[in-house]
Image (tube, grey):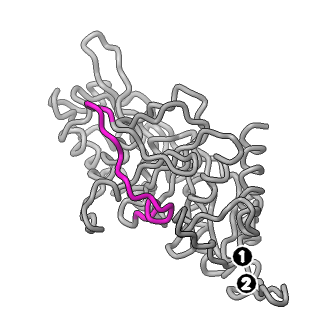
Amino acid sequence: MMTEEQVIDILKPIQEPFLHKSIVEANSVKEIRVKENYVSLKIAITQANSPEQMQLQQEIVNTLKGAGVESVGLRFEQRQEEGQTQSTSDETKSSDKKTTFIAVASGKGGVGKSTVSVNLATSLAREGKKVGLIDADIYGFSVPDMMGIAERPKVAGEQIFPVERFGVKVISMAFFVEDNAPVIWRGPMLGKMLNNFFNDIEWGDIDYMILDLPPGTGDVALDVHKMLPQSKELIVTTPHPTAAFVAARAGAMALKTDHDVLGVIENMAYFESKKTGEKEYVFGQGGADKLTEELQTEVIGRIPLGQPEMRDDDFAPSVYTADSKIGKIYQDIAKKVIEKVEK
């Protein structure tokens, strides 16, 4: 495993863009944390949230990865003349309150992660919790459509207010693009948008902030891990062994970055016939159980295949009602989450 001294040596050639000397010599490296193949750094920079910060971030990440580090977490803070620093991009407006952040992750797409995120959020709201939902799957945003949200966030002066439905405050990239246009961005731009979601939205008091992460362990997932070092995670998989095998990567990333894995949700666990009540295990069995063994956690819910009841008066194509069979399963999951977090 790499040592802190080795990390310092690797960083010495990298210059602070405004002081024009090494970030080590300039005492810009405020914190170092090394765990297996993961390195976490806090860097003080003369002008935070600037193009130079983006360039410095990329240079640090590329340099460390070139030296064999698998994952890099970065936090930046503003350098002050008096030697004091002010945190910039790593704390959300809700972070000084008792907000619990729960990232919903998966190893691959198509396992129903967004459906789980939406129904967990609405179920927590039914339990009387103040809930926010960030559609952090910036390339594959779908939450507003799934919840039947047609309006856009309201803007008053420089304040942006999330859209609220079913007692859940929602923000998504979908609100900021036209006609379902594709998002063609590189990593630093994605990180900046996530930072805006955390810091520039008037969330108010929030008990639980649910983050619908993109599948896998790419730039956005890594940005969330570095911005929210105290986040908890739920891993979504299907029973299929391959899906569970891939989901293990997302779980391993959570553990490497000191996130607390609350448990595994097995989606599409079975199909239950309405006529006979017989269960058919369309995607096999055992995937989630094997995953919990690897991550040393538990299965906190098994969701069967099913379609929410479509209602014209309250259109939300992916939200299960509280009295539906699957809705009750989600309600049980929400209660388990509350118990785990608040015990």
Left or right: where does residue 51 sit relative to residue 145? Answer: left
Could you tell me if residue 7 is visible in this image? no
Q: Is residue 27 left or right of residue 321?
A: left
Name the residue at 68% across, 48% down: 126
Let me know if residue 153 is in the magenta part: yes
Real-space Cα separation, disc 1 to disc 2, in angstroms: 6 Å
The amino acid pointed to by label 2 is: Phe
Return the residue at label 2.
271
SS for callout 2: strand
Query: Viewer-proximal residue, 124 or 320?
Result: 320
In the rendered structure, which amino acid carries the disc numbered 1?
Answer: Pro
x, y percentage for residue 297? 75, 57
Q: Secondary structure at mark 1?
A: loop
Q: Residue at x 40, y 63 (%)?
A: 141
Q: Disc 1 designates what residue?
A: 304
Q: Residue at x 59, y 69 (%)?
A: 247
